[in-house]
Amino acid sequence: QLQLVESGGGLVQPGGSLRLSCVASGSPLDYYTIAWFRQAPGKEREGVSCISTTGKYVDYADALKDRFTISRDNAKNTMYLQMNGLKSEDAGLYYCASLRKLLSRSCPLSAEDYTDWGQGTQVTVSA
């Protein structure tokens, strides 16, 4: 089982940027497909972005692909989410999640596919 700890959330003005990090422990990240999800108050958890085991395949929610960038550094057992041009609707609790499955050409963006989850980091977008 992978333990995941997110960081990097905070308060940012509209149009600003944040970089979220997720550090994994308990097993090398090389064996895992990983993803970011978010949940706003009163809304369901939604997929933000995922990245394949090797990092060669990424996917994003349609509305986010021009502003968010996912990446991973397996040597550091860490994944990242760079978020630019933040909007009020981007606010919420952001979670990283992992799936112990070697996927090189795809990654799922459905929460049901992921088995390990962090506790989340809060992102607030406000002037």
Image: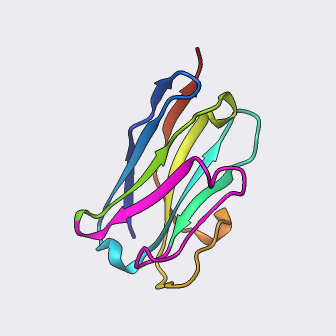
Q: In this view, does 101 lie to the left or right of 78?
A: right
Determine whether 102 is above or below 75 in the image.
below
For the N terminus, which image quadrant?
bottom left
Q: Position of residue 45 (x, y in %)?
A: 69, 49
Q: Position of residue 71 (x, y in %)?
A: 42, 61
Task: Give the camera-side residue of 86 and 80.
Answer: 86
Q: Position of residue 21 (x, y in %)?
A: 37, 48
**Going 30% across and 72% down the picture, which residue do you hit?**
27
Inspect this view and state whether residue 7 appears: yes
Look at the image and say whether residue 92 sits in the magenta stretch.
no
Q: Is residue 30 left or right of residue 124?
A: left
The colour scheme of the drawn protein is: rainbow
Quadrant of res 115: bottom right
> Furthest residue to the left?
75
Task: Give the camera-side residue of 11 and 42.
Answer: 11
Q: Is residue 29 left or right of residue 121?
A: left
**Going 58% across and 80% down the picture, which residue do you hit?**
106
Task: Look at the image and give the residue range highlighted in magenta.
Answer: 52-75
Look at the image and say whether residue 59 sits in the magenta stretch.
yes
Inspect this view and state whether residue 119 appears: no
Quadrant of res 125: top right
**Going 58% across and 34% down the picture, which residue do you hit?**
86
Determine whether 10 is above or below 72 in the image.
above
Q: Position of residue 99 (x, y in %)?
A: 50, 73
For the C terminus, which image quadrant?
top right
